[in-house]
Image (spheres, grey):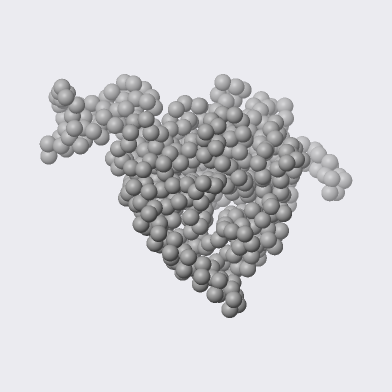
Amino acid sequence: MKKIFLAIICLAMWTSQAMAASNSEEQMEKLTREFLAHYNGELPPGTSVSADSTEINVDLQKFLADPVAKRYFEQMGKVLMAEKAVDTEMKVEVNDLKLEEVPVTTQAAMKAKRGVKRKAVTAPILTYCSAIPYTYMSVDGENNPMRVSSMMYRPTAFQFNLNAKLGVGNIIWGIGFAIIDLVKGAWNAVFGYTFDYGILGCHPTVTTSIEAPTGKRPLDGDIQMFCSDYALVVCPDYCGYGISDYKQHPYLVQGVTARNVVDGYIAALDLVNDKRISGASGSWSFASDFYTDLMGYSQGGSVALSTLRYLESGQVSDSDLKRINLRNVYCGDGPYSPKATVKQYVDWSNMDDEKYNKMAYPCVLPLIVQAAKQAYDNDCMRTVELDDYFTPEFLGTGIVNMLDSKRVTTEELNKVTTQAGTVKVAQIMSNNFIKQAEVLDSATNTLRTMNVFNTESNEYKCLLRAMEYNDLTKGWTPHHPLLFMHLDGDLVVPYCNMLEVQKNLPRDPSKKMVFTTPYEVKDHMSLIWGFISEHVKDVFDNPDHSKMGTFFYIAAAAGAFEEMLSE
């Protein structure tokens, strides 16, 4: 009871101080830590507390009425209550060192054995990985320091995978590889892990923290399949999700998100090197030829490309670049050119076929505008508001409040807008951004009333500038092997994005750049059997953006991308 009383007293002190300090990032973190220390009965020496219970309740009500401070306390508090004490100079803070054994099941339960001429995709008998959440310091959409969360996966000690193709000889080889797995697993259990390579994964568009990597049901769970290949798999949350979900997510503000991803990966490498932490389950280490493959699908595809640009920009130290040792980059169905993406949505709105003239993901449009306003508030975007871009009918669905709440998933958001009948671009965007005009229809060679950009409006000019800032297809030359896969019928992230890359992105003659479709990738896949073959068959019978995301990771794990870049 004494501890509870002290906790209430200290919460009152903490909240009143926080309100007085305008809830700055640094002050909220400092006071959150102080409160949690008080909650554990560790009052600092010389601290005196006295407060009337009525005053405590009033202060608490004031605090809870501030959604930013409340959300910060909820998210930060969860981490700080469970985090492991580490040296103050370390960049990494661990949520929970009790490794949570997460079965790698269903679509993610597969394996790609690395090695010369050996890229067989298999169905495992038993494969487990450990999910390790941690936090680290990076920046927000306004380039202010902030704490971000991430998830790291590693194989568990024992894994038994049947790596066999059909045929007696191949089955014998598969059993042999399974025995090697068991021996290696037993060795690792006693002497610790040696990570052969790293996978840095960039997650797709999400609107809630439970969809992000540290959430309960991450959309990029397919990337966990690499755990069965003795890889260190790292999937950082983006700013605005996980521990930082009280912040605005800088959607398609490429530089900020790229830095979040790189900072998160460097923090994971530091975590592996911390022997006090890795000693919890045997020491961890890196192979002498350790390398990193960078990949992402959908928004993650553009983030992966932006991350490559950031790594090559000179902003990362030579020592960290050497530790990362980036090898290949794989990008799937990403919005590399925001302007081309939005223009395709507008062009599709003029088609009679509802398959095209209804947006698959209406929620991305307010995400783009919100992020541009935050990131470029000192620019033209400061002169415009959300109301200037969207119709009253679309805003009337409550979508902006739902996005701000971070409690409504992308699927749920799309259902809301569909039920409200606001799924066509003209029903979503106001006349300030798009307008109707008489245009020559190239298909029929006749004049027709069509939706077009309102190129003379301030709203269009401002957002165009923000979108051009974040166009990854211009202004730099990649110096690592790159593979782009894109479904030519993708209705969520249009195929025009890959065409923009092909047309505009300069090439380094010494580094291969491959442009491909899922159909071409499938031809490079090794024999696939069991449930995997049925899944792949279903993907190609009914192709869509989501299913191709799973296929993207299957192909990467199978070594198809690696093979195509090495040809």
Residue furthest out toward the right: 445
Viewer-nearest residue: 171 or 458: 171
Q: Quadrant of residue 63?
A: top left
Q: Is residue 135 above or below residue 293?
A: above
Viewer-nearest residue: 100 or 168: 168
Q: How many marks?
A: 0
Q: Residue at x 57, y 58 (%)?
A: 114
Q: Residue at x 52, y 53 (%)?
A: 223
Q: Is residue 360 above or below residue 375?
A: below
Viewer-nearest residue: 74 or 440: 74
Quadrant (top left, top right, bottom left, bottom right) of the C terminus: bottom right
Quadrant (top left, top right, bottom left, bottom right) of the N terminus: top left
Q: Residue at x 71, y 45 (%)?
A: 513
Residue furthest out toward the left: 2
Residue 14 shown left or right of residue 564 in the figure: left
Q: Residue at x 84, y 41 (%)?
A: 440
Whether residue 426 is visible, yes or no, is no
> Percent position (x, y) of residue 107?
52, 62
Whether residue 17 is visible, yes or no, is yes
> Percent position (x, y) of residue 381?
59, 25
Q: Is residue 17 above or below residue 436?
A: above
> Percent position (x, y) of residue 78?
32, 41
> Percent position (x, y) of residue 243?
40, 39
Residue 43 shown left or right of residue 140 in the figure: left
Viewer-nearest residue: 7 or 316: 316
